[in-house]
Image (tube, rainbow, N blue to C red):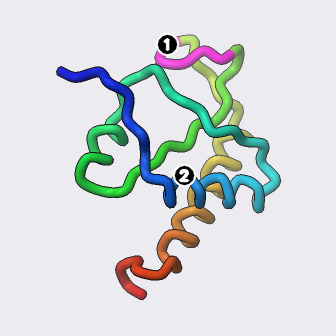
Amino acid sequence: HDQSPFVLHYRVREQLARAAAEAGASYRVMASGAGHDAGYVSAVAPAGMLFVPSRDGISHSRDEWSDVEDIALGAVVLARALRHLDRAPGASGT
């Protein structure tokens, strides 16, 4: 299958960044070298991704570890971003 990189939806990325800033979370826009379902979903619907820090940057390994505080903050950021997207003009339900 094709392993080309995907560019995820601008509005989703924008709202994730906005939500992170509002929650006081440090963030950066980054590329992921791993294949993710979001890339395939982006072919048919707006998609984005949110990563939380992993100890020593290790991911996709049995040694991967994220602190519960980082996971909780990620959940807050995700919830805020979803609220922003739901309230955006043209969002379903508005």
Asked whether, in this view, residue 90 is left or right of residue 79, the answer is left
Q: In the displayed image of the protein, which residue is found farthest to the left?
A: 1
> Which amino acid type is marked by label 1?
Ser
Q: Could you tell me which residue is drawn at 52 percent across and 79 percent down?
A: 87
On whether residue 59 falls in the magenta region, the answer is yes
Above or below: residue 84 compared with residue 40: below
Residue position for label 1: 61
> Residue 77 is drawn in which quadrant?
bottom right
Which span is picked out in magenta? 57-62
Image coordinates for residue 94, horizontal then vertical, percent: 42, 87
Q: Could you tell me which residue is drawn at 57 percent across and 71 percent down?
A: 84
Q: Could you tell me which residue is drawn at 66 percent across and 53 percent down?
A: 17
- 81 or 68, nearer to the observer: 81
Q: Could you tell me which residue is drawn at 62 percent across and 65 percent down?
A: 80
Q: Distance between the residues labelled 2 and 1?
A: 26 Å
> Which amino acid type is marked by label 2?
Arg
What mark, if any, has residue 81 been given in the picture? none
Asked whether, in this view, residue 30 is left or right of residue 61, the answer is right
- Sequence-first disc among 2 and 1: 2
Q: In the displayed image of the protein, which residue is found farthest to the bottom?
A: 94
- 10 or 65, nearer to the observer: 10
Q: What element carries label 1?
A: loop
Q: How many marks?
A: 2
Residue position for label 2: 13
Image coordinates for residue 4, horizontal then vertical, percent: 32, 24
Q: Is mark 2 on a helix, strand or loop?
A: helix
On whether residue 37 falls in the magenta region, the answer is no
Asked whether, in this view, residue 40 is left or right of residue 30, the answer is left
